[in-house]
Image (cartoon, rainbow, N blue to C red):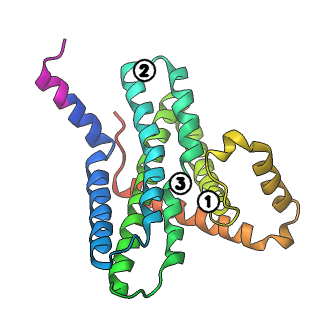
Amino acid sequence: MLNPLEYLSRLHRFFSSQLLYPIVLSTMLAFALFSARVIQSQAFTYKNLVWNLFLAWLPFLFSLSAAALHAFFPKHWWLLIFPGIMWLIFFPNAPYIITDFLHLMDRPSVPLWYDILLLATFAWTGCFLAIASLRTMQILVKRYLGWFLSWVFAFSALALGGLGIYLGRFSRWNSWDLFFQPKEILYDIGIRLVNPLSNLRFFGFTILFTAFLVICYLTFISVRPGNET
């Protein structure tokens, strides 16, 4: 049985491997910038960023739970199915914050450069959460299914992420709508797929944001090889 110090040491190594500490620091900076803006302006402008960042944390928490289950029960792969599905459903919420730059404008009492920094910090944190959680899930898939299928999984998740960002920004669907209105969402996607010339924005946006996410992810894993053992 582990003594408290050994337990804390293992917990620290696990959190470090999942990049929890820099993500928490990035989140704290985002909230600090937002709080300072509220105090200065006496208004809750950009309050949607707080909600969106909360949603961005969900896929990371699901990936964290999947990694923890694997650490405790490495032979029980079926335990990862539920957190894996939930991770995939909520994954687009993490990079979605990038699109909040659409709300950027010069507003009284707060300099434009400050709002740019505010939005950039929230967007960076969301992307950070997305990339870290995907890396964790890809490593888990690699351990069970091999290198090739892990990359099929990663690129598929990134493509679904680009699609999910579009559906959230322009069709105003939420991740939880998949539980309550799955047919409507599939119809929304299907009608665009069968009428490509009438939905160029759909294809252009999804492809470009997928490409952006792919570049972000490949850059990340090139700089930091990962936490495989």
Q: Residue 162: give its label.
A: 1
Name, please, the residue furthest toward the front.
42
Q: Position of residue 219 (x, y in %)?
A: 42, 61
Label the magenta part by its dominant secondary structure: helix
Q: Which mark is residue 93?
A: 3
Q: How many marks?
A: 3
Residue 217 visible somewhere in the drawing:
no
Rendering quarter of residue 168: bottom right
Between residues 33 and 37, which one lies in front from this camera angle?
37
- In whole angstroms, how far apart are the C-alphas of marks 3 and 1? 10 Å
Earlier residue among tags 3 and 1 = 3
Q: Quadrant of the C terminus?
A: top left
Give the residue drawn at x 43%, y 88%.
106
**Residue matched to label 2:** 74
- Residue 6 in view (yes/no): yes
Task: Looking at the picture, tell me which residue is in the foreground, 23 or 76.
Answer: 23
Nearest to N terminus: mark 2 or mark 1: 2
Q: Is residue 165 magenta?
A: no
